[in-house]
Amino acid sequence: MALLEVKNLTISFGGLRAVDDFNLSIKKGQLYGLIGPNGAGKTTVFNLLTGVYKPDEGIVRLEDKDITGLKTIEINKAGIARTFQNIRLFKDLTVLDNVKVGLHNHHPYSTLEGIFRLPRYYRVEREMNERAAELLKVFDLEGEADYLAANLPYGKQRKLEIARALATEPKLLLLDEPAAGMNPNETGELMDTIRFVREEFNMTILLIEHDMKLVSGICEELTVLNFGRILTHGKTNDVLNDPQVITAYLGE
Amino acid sequence: MNKMNSKLKLNKTTKNNLITYLLVIAAYLIVQILLAGGHMSSLMEGLLVPLCIYVMLAVSLNLTVGILGELSLGHAGFMCVGAFSGAFFSKCMQGAMPDGIRFLLALIIGAVAAGIFGVLIGIPVLRLKGDYLAIVTLAFGEIIKNLVNVLYIGRDRNGFHFSMKDSISLHLEEEGEVIINGAQGITGTPHDASFTVGIILILISLAIILNLIHSRDGRAIMSIRDNRIAAESVGIHITKYKLMAFSISAAIAGVAGVLYAHNLSTLTALPKNFGYNMSIMILVYVVLGGIGNIRGSIISAVVLTLLPELLRGLSDYRMLIYAIVLIAMMLLNWSPKAILWKERIKEKYFSGLKSKKEVK
């Protein structure tokens, strides 16, 4: 059974069909890549999956539950979390607090319990601190827990974004160009982290990426988008050797 | 190691909050000593309650401007709602119950009324952003003030009478009394406000705001400020938390309004006290004290309220100097060069103390 099932997803902006008849099926535990030239509509697909845009047509199912057209927060609660191409951290909050915002919905106490500092406040906050520390440790950020997010170096900001997304306990993690702006060393490290996240959290991951080393290194299956339409999809090696893909994207 | 870190941080914020509370209590004690020694002019004595009111207004507006990150220019409007609802209640219930309980209830009613207005105004207004939001809140503030100016409510044995025209059209019976008399406002509100009450209310407001900020809800509010799209993507309910911050801020302004009403014998809604001048003045306190810095708001509200009085001796030059001090303080606090200079001074003289401190 597929974890994520997307059928005939379509959206137009004015006269432009940004995404046209997009189909996708991801099995649980898979590491799936979405590639394509700039402007192909990859991020638009992410925005459709996470409820930023509502599709004109098509169906999105997560574990057989129809989540088409739900609001962003409902989709997050249903189990999809994401990172952003241009990093979007809570820059004036500490690294720890960034993760704790991700934990928000899973560790509740009421506003009054917070204001009057009732016992539940202390208990839940302690839980949150522990859970956040665990997550930070996975991403090697525990030493920077008290830094403001804005003061982190670039590579670590990317990691923090993933940590924050994982804090919402998703079933599916969407990574939008996680290696953008990273040097080869950092990219290598990131690949290890992504693999580790999949093993450790038993996570299903869909990622957009331009870095072919990363894509061929960790993705099991790929879908290639071009001008909003699917060019091809299949096993990573087959797709990357497809002459169509080479002309459209990789260059001869 | 990790646990230690998070514990350390918790302690740091707790310590910071404690300093703020102690600052307020210390100010209270100093004033009490001055009063007991007879070292305070009657003019200064008259300023004590307004000082508390301004502090509460500045602190509450900082919740909207600094923590939620939305520029509101209608804060005096919420104060106005609180003032009139609280004074109305006190007028009606005077003598019907002990003064202390009546005043307490008036404070609660003022807070609730202003909070409800906060929600009502917040629902349409918080859909806007930045400058647009500022201008619309400004308009709402003015609307509230002007509505109160044409509001007539009277009471006789048949109950309450209500009009938007004049006091004649209330058709009161002989012995009936007009409670809110349009532009003349409410006269004869009992004088319940005192400096002690003011300080207690400041401490309560501070506790509410500081505890809110350092809780799950506070983090959610600040995450919306820093990045709305990301906040939504991790499941933060934007509207809910925006409204929460906005209405709590309004409710505390309402309490300040009740205090204001019970400090004067006549309560009228003038441009001077509930107009946009007032809203902007509160915003000046917030900006000067540091956006998002609660303790800073307290200090700047106190300094800027006292300054014109302390400069009274300079008569005509008073407001000029006030303006110059304002500009100088702004520059000293916020220009990058001045910040660097302050850092250097700190490093030079407090390097031993500072060694542990990280980049903010």
Image (spheres, coloured by chain):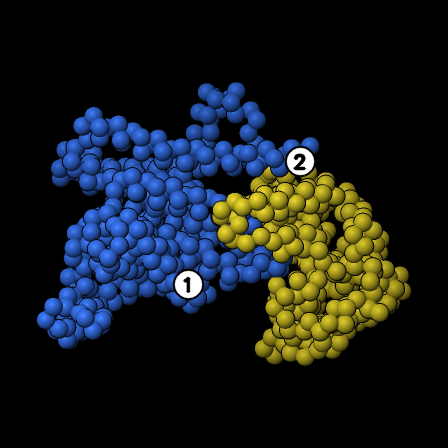
Chain colours: A yellow, B blue
Q: What residue would you read off at disc 2?
A: B3
- Can residue B123 be seen here? The reply is yes
Q: What residue would you read off at disc 1?
A: B119
Q: In screen coordinates, is A100 left or right of A30?
A: left
Near-viewer residue (B43 or A60)? B43
The amino acid marked with disc number 1 is: Val
Q: In screen coordinates, is A163 left or right of B127?
A: right
The amino acid marked with disc number 2 is: Lys
Mark 1 or mark 2, which has the lower sequence index? 2
Question: How many residues crowd around disc 2 within 10 Å: few (fewer than 14), some, or many (20 or more)?
Answer: some
Near-viewer residue (A155 or B299)? B299
Q: Residue at x 26, y 31 (%)?
A: B32
**Can you say whether B78 is above or below B37 in the image?**
below
Q: Residue at x 18, y 59 (%)?
A: B186
CA gap between label 1 and label 2 equals 39 Å
Residue projecting furthest to the left: B174
Mark number for residue A215?
A: none
Q: Are marks 1 and 2 on the same chain?
A: yes
Near-viewer residue (B350 or B252)? B252
Q: Secondary structure at mark 1?
A: helix
Chain hosting mark 2 = B
